[in-house]
Image (tube, grey):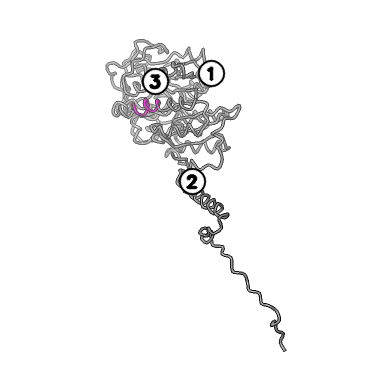
């Protein structure tokens, strides 16, 4: 006989408990439980809102922890380097990084080479050494955000369009890019209490002086939009530095004709193809040696410029100079960068320093071309034409002030050697740089 449970009272199972969030949410029969449900509702809503906010922010705002670039570190100077993807700016970044500065490069890449950034990133991969931000200095909101998110100690301002000929064709672009953008940088510095500025200027601000050599006291009467825009930017900087609340350390460097490249062959000059006609005389020489153009065709301007046009012909063989061609002051980019670093190290709050950066020694155009032929090993074809009215026989600097006050003297004064180093890079980089990844603002 099977056992029976007839004698035992059967226990009914308890009613199943609902784990539905909806059931709990609407069950307010117990007044004591209502606050708990309301808290859960509020927390869920807040979490949802936070998730939506985070997902809609740009990548640069979703930081798990503060960046090392946003905090000051004793013994480390953080430099904002504008235009650091350009020819001179990239060489300046290399030198600063070698000297253990912390560097943030801001460049919109309209003229700079992003491949130069890749070279620097590969050379200095350690965290906290170098960051690159692609941004336009003409965007005040982006510039202010960069200053707000980084603890800068100084600004080295290179960013600028810099072709005299182009400036006469597009003057408004030059006033916007040089003068207005410098004002944006200054306003951001004032807002975020950054007190040191090293400004990259040009001898084009002097115009056509009455006598040589050019000193810092030579009157400034620029004759083209490039020189005028730089002069306006200088004036804005100087006016602001005089205000009581500024208390700034300002260094303005006016330099002459830049040549050369990194002696170790890591960086060089690689202008965009469409800008070759506005480029430097060294670029024209190298293009002729590479067969990109049939021969060296350079038109010298009547102004004092940091560049020469490579358009029609070398003009002028009847100057009162040893070989009949005009004389200019050529400064190696390595020496130029050294002057900027010395200026940064010597900058003092409440003081302004203005310096010409040149060798103090002029070289004739014919001498330059012969040095280029020797450096490249190519017999470059050159045509010489009669001088034009108004062309100056000699244009060169007097570097006595920068020699005396910053203890700076040009070291790379062998014209042939500077061109040989630059040519070595040009031969190895006929197609320029390759692009890396960058933060975009």
Residue name at image x 50 percent, y 34 percent: 149
Q: Main secondary structure of the magenta part?
A: helix
The total number of labels drawn is 3
Residue name at image x 39 percent, y 12 percent: 218
Query: In the figure, residue 109 lies in which quadrant?
Result: top left
Mark 3 or 1, closer to the camera:
3
Residue 266 located left or right of residue 212: right
Is residue 363 visible to the viewer in this orientation of the structure?
no
Q: Of the residues under marks 2 and 3, which one precedes in the sequence?
A: 2
**Residue contact at pointers 2 and 3, CB within 8 angstroms:** no
* Residue 176 on the magenta span: yes
Q: Secondary structure at mark 1?
A: helix
Q: Secondary structure at mark 3?
A: helix
Q: Residues within 10 Å of mark 3 (few under 14, many from 20)?
A: some
Q: Which mark is residue 98?
A: none
| Residue that label 3 marks | 236
* Residue 334 on the magenta span: no
Mark 2 or 3, closer to the camera:
2
Magenta-highlighted residues:
175-183
Q: Position of residue 439 (x, y in %)?
A: 47, 40
Q: Position of residue 33 (x, y in %)?
A: 57, 55
Residue projecting furthest to the bottom: 1
| Residue that label 2 marks | 54
Disc 3 to disc 1, C-alpha distance: 22 Å
Q: Of the residues under marks 2 and 1, which one precedes in the sequence?
A: 2
| Residue that label 1 marks | 346
Q: Secondary structure at mark 2?
A: helix
The one of 424 and 102 positioned closer to us in this rendering:
102
The one of 65 and 73 positioned closer to us in this rendering:
65
């Amino acid at each position: 006989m099977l056992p029976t449970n007839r004698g035992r009272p059967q226990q009914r199972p308890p009613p199943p408990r609902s784990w539905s969030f909806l059931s709990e949410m609407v069950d307010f029969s117990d007044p004591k439980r209502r606050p708990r449900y309301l808290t859960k509702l509020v927390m869920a809503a807040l979490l949802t809102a936070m998730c939506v906010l985070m997902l809609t922010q740009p990548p640069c705002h979703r930081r798990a922890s503060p960046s090392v670039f946003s905090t000051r570190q004793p013994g480390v100077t953080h430099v904002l380097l504008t235009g650091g993807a350009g020819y001179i700016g990239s060489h300046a970044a290399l030198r600063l990084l070698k000297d253990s500065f912390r560097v943030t490069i801001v460049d919109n890449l309209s003229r700079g080479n992003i491949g130069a950034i890749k070279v620097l990133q590969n050379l200095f991969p350690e965290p906290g050494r170098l960051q690159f931000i692609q941004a336009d200095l003409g965007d005040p909101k982006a510039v202010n955000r960069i200053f707000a998110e980084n603890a800068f100690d100084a600004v080295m301002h290179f960013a600028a369009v810099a072709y005299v000929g182009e400036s006469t064709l597009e003057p408004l672009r030059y006033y916007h890019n040089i003068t207005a953008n410098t004002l944006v940088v200054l306003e951001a510095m004032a807002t975020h209490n950054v007190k040191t500025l090293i400004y990259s200027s040009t001898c084009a601000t002097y115009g056509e002086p009455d006598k040589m050599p050019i000193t810092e006291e030579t009157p400034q009467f620029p004759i083209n939009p490039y020189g005028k825009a730089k002069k306006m930017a200088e004036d804005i900087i100087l006016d602001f530095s005089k205000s009581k609340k500024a208390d700034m350390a300002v260094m303005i460097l006016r330099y002459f004709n830049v040549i050369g490249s990194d002696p170790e062959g890591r960086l060089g000059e690689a202008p965009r193809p469409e800008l070759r006609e506005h480029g430097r005389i060294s670029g024209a020489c190298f293009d002729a040696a590479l067969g990109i153009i049939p021969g060296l065709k350079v038109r010298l301007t009547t102004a004092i410029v940091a560049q020469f046009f490579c358009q029609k012909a070398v003009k002028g063989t009847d100057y009162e100079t040893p070989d009949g061609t005009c004389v200019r002051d050529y400064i190696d980019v390595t020496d130029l960068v050294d002057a900027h670093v010395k200026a940064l190290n010597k900058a003092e709050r409440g003081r302004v320093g203005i310096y010409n950066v040149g060798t103090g020694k002029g070289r004739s155009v014919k001498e330059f071309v012969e040095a280029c032929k020797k450096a490249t090993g190519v017999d470059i074809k050159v045509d010489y034409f009669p001088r034009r009215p108004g062309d100056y026989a000699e244009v060169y600097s007097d570097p006595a002030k920068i020699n005396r006050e910053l203890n700076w003297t040009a070291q790379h004064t062998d014209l042939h050697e500077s061109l040989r180093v630059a040519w070595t890079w040009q031969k190895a980089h006929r197609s320029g740089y390759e692009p890396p990844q960058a933060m975009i603002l």
